Image (cartoon, rainbow, N blue to C red):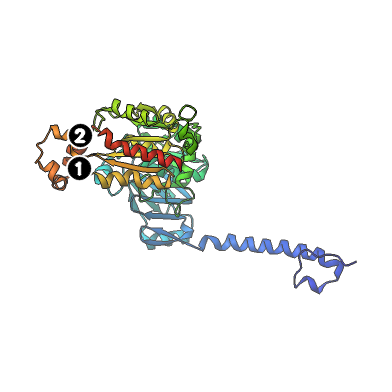
Amino acid sequence: MDEKITYDTFFARSFSRSDQKKLGYGAFIGCLLIALSFCLVFMPYSSQSIRLGTSVPKRMNLVCKSEKRSDYCEINGEDVRIDAKSSTVFIVASSQQSIRDLEDNNTSLLIGPYSRKEDQIAMKSVRKWLVKPVMESNVIPHCSQAHSVPAILFSLGGYSGNNYHDFTDIIIPLYSTARIFNGEVKFVVTNSNPWWINKFRNLVQKLSNYEVIDIDNEENIHCFTSVVVGLKRAPQELSIDPSKSSYSMKDFRQFLRSAYSLNKARAIKIEDEDDDDDDGKTRPRLLIVARNRTRAFRNTDEIVGMARNLGYEVGVAEADGNIQRFAEIVNSCDVMMGVHGAGLTNMVFLPENAVLIQVIPFGGVEWPARAAFREPSKDMNIKYLDYKIKAEESSLIEQYPADHEVFKNPLSISKQGWLTFKAVYLDKQDVNLDINRFKITLLKALELLHQ
């Protein structure tokens, strides 16, 4: 009986039938070794690194990109030294070819590692770092503390401390940049705020297995073989671009549920038969996000009473520094409503298919309000509704006559600058909802929970 030959080659056919099987296996292994050698030799040269518009050969292992919201550099397989005194990230060239590449491309550049680079006010409080390749290691500070895992250098300046900017400018970009390391990465933080680290400790510890390095207060020269300077961020707010990332907002929201041990994955689905049996059905839970300083609801009790009459179980809470507590409250709800502001950022904790209702203040606030929360809701699988208040629902009627430019021409107020616009329409405005008019929106939310 003829032997079966698993791996046959042209070379093997020159031998006897009894030897072909052995030779076939040997040829197969040999081909694998040749292919592996080919990859090791040629793969480092197969693509291009980009330095903010300049191509640098891949053998440099330096990729720097300038995107709409952030600049960042990825440095791999090099001698990388971070010197806080000079605010410099030194990269020591590893070969003569690397030296020639550096000379040809002049790759030094200055990066503010905060993900809102177009905002000059935010960037004023962000320390800039020079990414500087050098030819010889003896002309730069010597390494005093070596690390065996990669590092990510980023800033807690800018608008950190505002919950919305904490997530859209820092936490989501940090997740996009760090998650791939599966905890084996160190966070090197400039403009560090200990209270910020403590507030988001659950997330920081979920992304890194190591203590945060407050680089601004370091005398040591910290040395790594791989460093990312800056964070990768999508152009849209509260978003991840899956075409440029291995992750999505769905992944991020699962990450949050894991970090804060949130149990509710999906919002309630109201069945039609439940409508005929009020006593036996589970009521959808509505959270009213309260605000006590600006853009506060003046008739919360009326809103609560009307919502309960519609069949909601209603809670009222204000977001604070206790992320765990508020995340649990939000995650337990099916509908969340509130006036435009940072408190609505907690939508990230809502279960899948939940409903977000944004109450938009009077004035020209529609576009920024919808960009901030309506657009991100799509990638989060959250259903979105908004309710734009009328002048008679605004406390501005107590501050200005009916024929004032504040009511007649909000655009003219906006032309006076952002600070003036913000002072009038965001800082000085409270809301007194028209209960009968707003009832339609709450009924629409119930309809969405049927779907």
**Quadrant the N terminus occupies:** bottom right
Query: Disc 2, disc 1: CB below 8 Å?
Result: yes
Residue bearing mark 1: 363
Q: Quadrant of residue 188?
A: top left
Find the distance from the CA under tag 2 to the CA under tag 1: 10 Å
Q: Earlier in the sequence, mark 2 or mark 1?
A: 1
Residue pictured at 64% horizontal, 63% vertical:
35
Residue bearing mark 2: 429
SS category of the residue bearing label 1: loop
Residue pictured at 42% horizontal, 29% vertical:
329
* Amino acid at pointer 1: Gly
Q: What is the crowding at mark 1: few (fewer than 14 residues within 10 Å), some, or many (at least 20)?
A: many
Q: Position of residue 269 (x, y in %)?
A: 48, 38
SS category of the residue bearing label 2: loop
Q: Position of residue 139 (x, y in %)?
A: 39, 49
The circle on residue 128 is none
Q: Nearer the viewer, residue 315 or 148?
A: 315
Position of 100 relative to 352 (above/below): below
Q: Residue furthest front?
A: 276
Q: Position of residue 312 (x, y in %)?
A: 40, 30
Q: Nearer the viewer, residue 368 or 332?
A: 332
* Amino acid at pointer 2: Gln
Position of 204 relative to 3 (above/below): above
Q: Position of residue 83 (x, y in %)?
A: 38, 42
Relative horizontal placement of residue 445, taking residue 10 as reference (left or right) = left
Relative horizontal placement of residue 424, taking residue 249 as reference (left or right) = left
Q: Residue furthest right?
A: 1
Q: What is the crowding at mark 2: few (fewer than 14 residues within 10 Å), some, or many (at least 20)?
A: many
Count of residue discs? 2
